[in-house]
Image: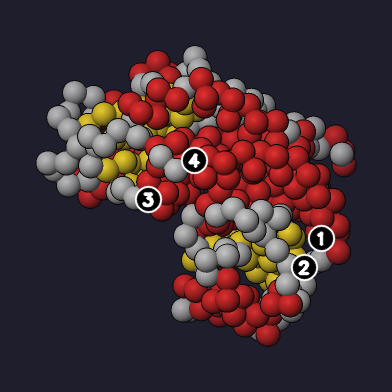
Amino acid sequence: MTNGFGQLTYPEISAQAEALAAALEQLERQKDWVSRYIGNPAFDEILFIGSGSSYYQAQTMAATYKKWVGRPASAHPSSEIFLFRDAAAVPGRNYLLVGVSRSGESTEVILALESVKGVQGWTTCGITCHEDSKMAQMAECLISPLGKEKSTVMTKSLSSMTFMMQAAAAIASGKPELLAESAEVVKADGNVVKAADAFAKSFVQEHELNKFIYLGMGSYYGLSQEACLKIKEMSYVWTESFGTLEFRHGPKSIVEPGTLVCLLLSESARSYELKVAEEMKAYGATVLVVTARKGDDTAFADAVFETGGANVSDEARGVLYLPVLQYIGFYTALKKNVDPDHPRNLTQVVKI
């Protein structure tokens, strides 16, 4: 690595296939957690909470849960629960509050869980990578055993926890075909990670970019926000994320040569989303499409990264999109002579 940069981050991005496999094995041991918590019909609504990357993956978890299980779910920043709970949850309902935290030590998620302790109609649980963390001591948690990281930015931890909660939602749905999709994703991820590494390294070397825009819809909206944060944390570039079609309503004014528009393409809204990307190409953007499958309809793009997995749902396939997005952040940092292991102003655990 350049100047010894990235010694922590690179191997962690590269190890996420193993982390996903371990998460699925651990979930088999924790199946009772699903029936007690997210699979329990006694709850009127599931609230997934987190901060930073954990909030963005909470958005993907909530979107997946609603689609697969067919019951109410939402995602909120942890701070909204302990400071503005009435804006997030109406009285008189039975809520399950799911804390999402890599470390299990984030002050905001701890305060949120503590704020509803003993409050009628509230039950807590969580997901983390650290079984001995404060959050895991406060509430029963799913554990991603190989999600632990030494780097500041979340990579394999985010992929493995997102995947694990989606697999838990598949169990809660009672639909075996959805759990089979999770197994397909585990099988595919190793090859996707290797291909993403080579693709991202070449893409970053070949393009001079000064703005980075990430677009996604449905369960991919949270992933687009995470991709935006990832490159910002690692390399300090100017970046934003938007719902794909929403980008046309004003924000597209920022597009000019030197702007990357990265589309996380769903199969559900494929034709609509590609129209947006093609429009941005006409304005001078460099367009990158991350998709299950290339086709004549993606030929206009400057680059296309193909994950495979068109036979599985958009929700299950989402974690296959993460490696290339993480590697682009990583290689952009190296190109700018920035160490992604030690982003300025950041710590692995945020405490108040």
- Label 4 near label 1: C-beta < 8 Å? no
Residue at image position (74%, 77%) is 296
Nearest to the eye among marks 1 and 4: give it. 4
* Image location (x, y in percent) of residue 321: 65, 52
Q: Amino acid at mark 3?
A: Lys
**N-term mark: 1 or 4:** 4
Label 1, label 4: how far apart the Cα atoms are: 38 Å
Dot 3 alpha-carbon crowd within 10 angstroms: few under 14, some 14 to 19, many 20 or more: some
Compute the Cα span from label 2 to label 1: 8 Å
Name the element at disc 2: strand
Q: Residue at x 16, y 41 (%)?
A: 93
Contact flag, marks 3 and 2 (Cβ < 8 Å): no
Say whether disc 3 or disc 2 marks the residue closer to the N-terminus: 3
Q: Position of residue 57 (x, y in %)?
A: 50, 44
Disc number placed over residue 303 in the picture, else none: 2
Type of amino acid at the residue the image marks with label 4? Pro
* Residue ID for mark 3: 66
